[in-house]
Amino acid sequence: MSFVPDGKKLVRSPSGLRMVPENGAFNSPFALDEPQWVPDKECPKCMQCDAKFDFITRKHHCRRCGRCFCDKCCSQKVALPRMCFVDPVRQCSECSLVSQKEVEFYDKQLKVLTAGGTFLVKVDSSEKSETTVCRLSNNQRYLFLDGDSHFEVELSRISSMQVLTDSPTSGGGSLRTSGMVLQYKPPGSQNLQELHMETADDKRVASAWLAAMHKAAKLLYESRDQ
């Protein structure tokens, strides 16, 4: 194990090298734990095509699900940022498809979220809306909201997230994303507060931010359910 700057460390696992926070409490809320590998003695054949393992047909473990496969069914090496792997790792065909979609989130949507969008924000039952820039922190753990004042919402304390839509102004077309409602628990409290966000001036940027946040919510809930 070796240490590197910025509060992260390089660790080696059976699956490969990983760059993880020195303090596990600072893990990204989107992170997934490495799976337990299915023991070799419990998988005499490929768990996808049923090919029997022998000296010629070698077994491989998918780094995402931990199951056993032959080389044909587990040949792709795909980036897996949710497990903090430094390099692409071997994955089965099913997991590689999921990971490829997540790579797109990390390459594109995450940049949209950290860049931020401008919204009209109301907290709880307040009748006053405040023009606020909302963005995801670089460590992915907080939503920063900056208007006349600054406050933060920890992603791990978000209980629900609902995207609001408007009907298209002309006939046909698709629904337009217009806002979001978050329910969360402030630090030190078990009582839910509600954050109501509506797109402000630059609706195109704000709508892109909401779409990215909707995808982030799916990863967030999946991480909690693992």
Image (cartoon, grey):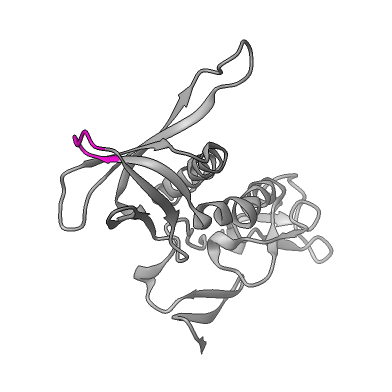
Could you tell whether 120 is left or right of 175 in the image? left
The residue shown at (16%, 58%) is: 188
In the rendered image, residue 139 lying in the magenta stretch gets the answer no
The x, y position of residue 102, in whole percent, is 61, 51
Looking at this view, name the residue that lies furthest to the bottom.
2
Residues 220 and 193: in front is 193
Q: Residue furthest top?
A: 171
x and y percentages locating residue 177 in the rendered image: 50, 30
Q: Position of residue 71 (x, y in %)?
A: 79, 58
Quadrant position of residue 146: bottom left
**Quarter of the rendering containing residue 65:** bottom right
At 57% from the left edge and 56% from the top edge, which residue is drawn?
111
Task: Tell me how many marks there are.
Answer: 0
Please determine whether, in this image, residue 134 is positioned above or below residue 214: below
185 relative to 62 in the view: left or right: left
Which residue: 40% across, 47% down? Answer: 225
- Vertical placement of residue 68 versus 20, above or below: above
Picture layout, residue 221 above or below residue 142: above
Q: Position of residue 223 (x, y in %)?
A: 44, 52
Residue 65 in view of the camera: no
Magenta: main secondary structure: loop
Q: Tell me where the magenta segment starts and ends, as one range.
A: 122-128
User: In the image, 204: left or right of 120?
Assistant: right
- Of residues 137 and 161, the one nearer the viewer is 137
Q: Quadrant of residue 85?
A: bottom right
Q: Nearer the viewer, residue 154 or 178?
A: 178
Position of 170 with respect to 145 (left or right) is right
Q: Is residue 31 above or below residue 98?
A: below
Is residue 169 at least partly visible in the picture?
yes
